[in-house]
Image (cartoon, rainbow, N blue to C red):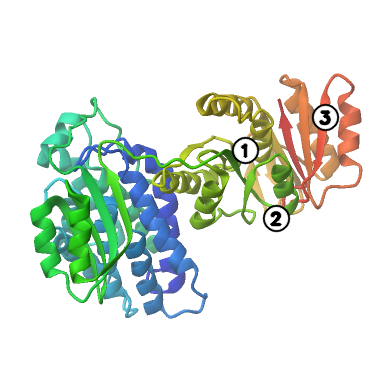
Amino acid sequence: MSTLVDPAGVRRWARLSADSLGRAGAEIDALNVFPVADGDTGTNLHLTMLSAAEAVESLPDDVDVAIAWQTLSYGALVGARGNSGVIVSQALRGLADVLKDGRGDLRAGLVRAAELARAAVARPVEGTVLTVLDAVARAVREEEGETATVAARAARAALGRTPEQLEVLARSGVVDAGGAGLAIILDALEEVVTGAGEGRFVVPAPTAAVVQQAEEGAGYEVMYLLDALEVDKLREELDELGDSLVIVGGEGLWNVHVHVEDAGAAIEAGLRVGRPYRIRVTYLAERTHRARGGRGVVAVAAGAGIAALFEECGAVVVRREPGSSPPLAAMVAGIREAGSEVAVLPNDEAVRAVAMAAAEVAREDGVTVSVLPTKATVQGLAALAVHDPLRRFDDDVVAMTDAAGHTRYGHVTVATRAAFTSAGVCRPGDVLGLIDGDVADLGPDLAEVAIRVVNRMVSGGGELVTLVTGADAPPGLAREIEERLGPLVEVTVHEGGQGVYPLLIGVE
């Protein structure tokens, strides 16, 4: 098992936290009623931890643990989004302050995290992520047992009490959104430290209609990074200008977050004490839209051949390595390149979270983005086949989503280890045939397994079969499948050249 006193453990915790927040982003967004009911806390926390994860993953494997923790803290600081994201970044700084020396005193680190986070908030409110952090710090000081397990358990219990402490949560039938995100992060912490957890945390769903409070006063969320030696005067000035003020950082670099009526005044206050940059201003009641010409599609692809297929169909392609997600920056750049109205094809369920995060970033630039639920390359190809830039964007998205949804997907691969599957026990070297993500067939011969899988998919109803052959596909495999299916089924064959999967299958 990896621990938090080695770089591999730091890296694994950051990535696991980011991925878990990405999967739960929509559920956390649905809880977001305080301080503003703008439904973006889950997205903001995901972006914050994604920035931290990508920063520490950029380091070499043999880096010193102190550098790993400092880089994690820096990545969270510069990538922090929203009120909760900024607070969590400060909590990570507290952990880094204690754990960077390699001693592994996690209890002291969590106590320090709670102290720094509360000190960063100008006017703390109970029933928020701060309350959950305090409960965690109190539990690890007072309770016996594995620290990570105590912390995760305390966070869940404290989260359940937040509606008793904040009236708007009780009225809306929700727990605090920021606290829910923190519970997920500590759930990941327990998994990394212990090698197992008490079960993945499930975000509680709202139990009542969410109260949409009208904004009184503060009309803009202003965020920026600030190069400055000290921020005491800035803190006083911004506290008078607005609310939800959080300033985190240190050693000359700060992340500033505040809700104000006059966005310009908040930026000018930063100019008086230092150099603000990466300035983001969001109207809290309604996002602004800056027009950008063109309609486009972004497709994520693993492998040069598949990338070429999507490019031939007119998509902007974002490349990824098999089994991994593309970097957030690459996804954002692809969306911005595609135009002002963009449909995104993740083409893998594991890529959807980073695609959603990239879409949120692009929307701040005025781009209209829709992430389609494509789970496989063949579904992306089916969606792109019906793309019509002359249709209304919403109608085009519906048509593309419908085409993807009516495409069953399968693939053939070779097992690398022994395992129990729904089709029986497989051994290294066995050929596995999967349909819609589940193992449906296995055997020793790749061609025979592929033919059986295609026949099984077509037998459920299908008129068009798409085959994408990989680098390890036997010569003549696609032709043999086409001959077996007969003249009543139309077969389209593409050479994808992808690794890992000798054959990708789509049936419409």
Q: Earlier in the sequence, mark 3 or mark 2?
A: 2
Viewer-side label of 2, 1: 1
Q: Residue at coordinates 67% horizontally, 40% vertically from top-left?
A: 377
Q: Nearer the viewer, residue 200 or 247?
A: 247
Q: Could you give the CA–CA distance between mark 3 and mark 2, rounded to whole angstroms?
A: 30 Å
Q: Check disc 2 and give the amino acid type.
A: Thr
Please state the horizontal and vertical placement of residue 176, each as a whole percent of the image: 22, 42
Q: Secondary structure at mark 2?
A: loop
Q: Earlier in the sequence, mark 2 or mark 1?
A: 2
Residue 412 drawn above or below residue 68: above
**For residue 86, side relative to residue 491 (left or right):** left
Q: Residue at coordinates 61% horizontally, 54% vertically from top-left?
A: 320
Q: Secondary structure at mark 1?
A: loop
Q: Check disc 1 and give the amino acid type.
A: Gly
Residue 146 seen anywhere in this rendered image of the structure: no
For the C terminus, give its image quadrant: top right
Q: Quadrant of residue 2?
A: bottom left
Question: Label 2: which residue?
Answer: 416
Please state the horizontal and vertical placement of residue 279, each as a whole percent of the image: 31, 58
